[in-house]
Amino acid sequence: MIDYPFEAVPAPGEAMQVATGIHWLRMPLPFKPDHINLWLLQDDDEDGPGWTIVDTGYAVDQTRTLWEQLLAGPMANGRVKRIIVTHFHPDHVGCARWLSEKTGAMVWMTTGEYLSAHAAHADVGGFDRANTGRLFMRHGLGKVLSAPPAPTSDPRAAAPTGERRDPPVPACYRRLMDGEQLSIGAHRWRVITAFGHAPEHATLACEDAAVLIAGDQILPTITPNISVWGNQPESNPLGQYLGSLSRFEPLAENTLVLPSHGRVFLGLHERLAALRTHHEDKLEALLAELGEPRCAADILPVLFKRPLGEFERILAMGEAIAHLHWLMYAGSASRQTGEDGLITFQALRPR
Ligand SMILES: [Zn+2]
């Protein structure tokens, strides 16, 4: 059973202790899910009292105002010693540069995430929206849009905020490596990298306190977005995601999981099993639909039971392709490209 040991969630601008020296912060997001959890680790050493920040919130004034409150309030007794960012998505990396400039603290990230953050901001390395838009069109996106998008259509142009999502990031960083041990205050933390949701997502496990900072990799009630994007059109992110879940199996049964969205929870192993089952069920349902060749746009209703808005349909395309690629790489489905360029998949009979 998933158990939520804390009734309350921290109020905006307040820190709530969830284990010795480990504090939970919440920041609003201008889109769903409507909040992100950030973490504040007490980082006292011979140089004096301090803090390590884990993840930074979306780059909007509301977040910066809350950080000002925290820095002047609960954090005023120590300086910020480092800023760890789990992955490059804008709700996590958003205020990293601003916080780094304000506090003088270095940003710590894996190389995959640091370079992806730069590429996403600069629209290079295939991170530009038009690149993914073209991929989704080849998988049938045009069938599920009310009007055909312009050739340079930006699949995220309809983002509710209407502003640029990917923020500028610092020009230097401290590299986080898988398996690296970090001493933060009284605790030791081990970096565990994970894949599928982001290129080299860092999670942090503290075995002495039985705490896991899970980022977006393990969420309590929703599954993270696992998508094929335009710059890696042949990727198998669902295979990478399910494969990296096993990296968390050795952690203790009583591990307190600190996810980026939702509430702090106990029941890591149950949640790992449920995440696997969720995707296995979707894959099985999908395979049953592939008696005839179908494109990714055709199978959106199999993966998503609720009606999807136009913007959600665009985002769902990447997830649909990810599930189809998993079946293809598992040898359960074949892929064909039609004369019109449309990519379809069909179930292969078991041999
Ligand atoms: Zn994310």
Image: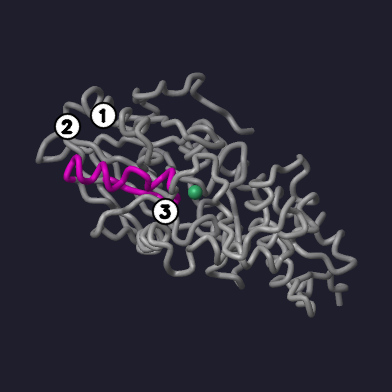
Please provide the residue range marked out in magenta.
83-104
In the image, is residue 87 part of the stretch drawn in magenta? yes
In the image, is residue 327 part of the stretch drawn in magenta? no
For disc 2, the marked residue is: 78
Q: Which amino acid, by three-letter code, is at mark 2?
A: Gly
Could you tell me how far apart the alpha carbons at marks 2 and 1 are, in whole angstroms? 14 Å
Q: Secondary structure at mark 2?
A: loop
Residues tagged 2 and 3 counted as in contact (Cβ below 8 A): no
Residue 92 x, y percent position in the rendering: 41, 45
Residue 1 x, y percent position in the rendering: 64, 33
Residue 175: name its quadrant: bottom left
Q: Nearer the viewer, residue 25 or 298?
A: 298
Residues tagged 3 and 1 counted as in contact (Cβ below 8 A): no
Residue 192 x, y percent position in the rendering: 42, 55
- Answer left or right for 7 relative to 169: right
| Residue at the (47%, 40%) spot, across then down | 260
For disc 1, the marked residue is: 68
Q: Residues within 10 Å of mark 1 (few under 14, many from 20)?
A: some
Residue 235: name its quadrant: bottom right
Q: Which amino acid, by three-letter code, is at mark 1?
A: Glu
Q: Earlier in the sequence, mark 2 or mark 1?
A: 1
Which of the numbered marks, if any, corresponds to residue 88? 3
| Residue at the (78%, 43%) spot, across then down | 305
Task: Please say if 233 is above or below 315.
Answer: below
Q: Which amino acid, by three-letter code, is at mark 3?
A: Phe
Q: Earlier in the sequence, mark 2 or mark 3?
A: 2
Q: Residues within 10 Å of mark 3 (few under 14, many from 20)?
A: many
